[in-house]
Amino acid sequence: MKAVFQTDRGRVRLHNEDAGGVFRNRDGFRLAIVADGMGGHRAGDVASEMTISALKTEWESASGINTADDAERWLKEQIKKVNLLLLDHATNNTECDGMGTTIVAAITTDTFATIANIGDSRGYLLNESGFKQITEDHSLVNELVRSGQISKEDAEHHPRKNVLLRALGTEKTVEMDVKTIIFEEGDILLLCSDGLSNKVNEAEMMELLQNDGNLQQKADTLILLANENGGEDNITLAIVEFSETREDDV
């Protein structure tokens, strides 16, 4: 297994409110996470950083997560705990009122990957069948696409594209999508914030991920392209590749 995490402020924003990382537990399995924070007075970076810190701590001490059921249960339980943690912090710190974050997180083992998401940070899978988005955006625009009111092409430039229907830390109860996929030799999992997916299309992502070069070079090139295409938002990604070849990685 190989993995890399990369984040960039972009060309416009003064602060980076994204956070994330790739972390190993006691059994050597990985948890990759991308969180895109939101909220005034820099509260967005508080929400995303608290989310990553809490999940990192829990994951690094975790073990015995050997089945898809184990992984799905762990993600649901821990993300719900983080949701309450963020709500409590916002309640007790007025400058953080209304803060929240998206999250896309994946547990990757030697046989499967389990992905959970809330909001519009995405997960993509590249395998022998091609390249596809495997998460569903929890956004107003995606609901309009799903209901047939606008086309997918219209959605790319819709004025309310940034309106989320779900976020972590904004309500007492939170709904998340959780799914498990087969993860095999040569497969690549890409998690990213909308700072990447809004600026680099799926064909470009697929081409770059298939190119020669190591994961760090691929991550750097994806972020470079997002910046070249405007870089108006923070850009964050995690890439996990199923490979029997050992290399220095996260």
Image: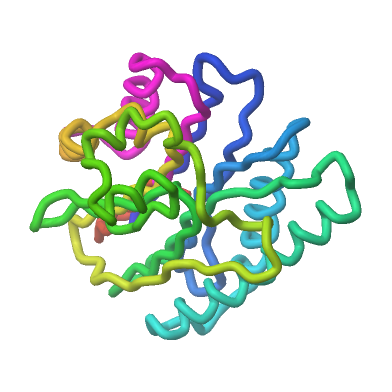
Give the magenta range: 211-238
Q: Foreground residue, 182 or 132? A: 132
Residue 95 pos. (x, y %): 85, 39
Residue drawn at x 51%, y 15% is: 11
Q: Residue at x 23, y 51 (%)?
A: 148
The structure residue drawn at horizontal position 82% and vertical position 61%, both measured from the top left corner, is: 88
94 above or below 223?
Answer: below
Compared across the picture, whether 19 is left or right of 195 comes to right
Looking at the image, residue 214 sits to the left or right of residue 211; the answer is right
State which quadrant residue 57 falls in: bottom right
Quadrant occupied by the N terminus: bottom left
Q: Which quadrant of the structure image shows residue 85?
A: bottom right
Q: Farthest front residue?
A: 149
Q: Is residue 92 above or below residue 205?
A: below
Residue 69 image offset from top left, x and y in percent:
42, 85
User: In the image, is residue 205 above or below residue 10?
Assistant: below
Question: Closest to the observer: 41 or 65?
Answer: 41
- Asked if residue 22 can be seen in this view, the reply is no
Q: Is residue 133 left or right of residue 46?
A: left
Relative depth, front residue between 195 and 23: 195
Q: Position of residue 81 (x, y in %)?
A: 69, 70
Would residue 26 appear left or right of 45 to someone viewing this image? left
Please provide percent x and percent y for residue 98.
Answer: 74, 46
Residue 91 in the magenta stretch? The answer is no
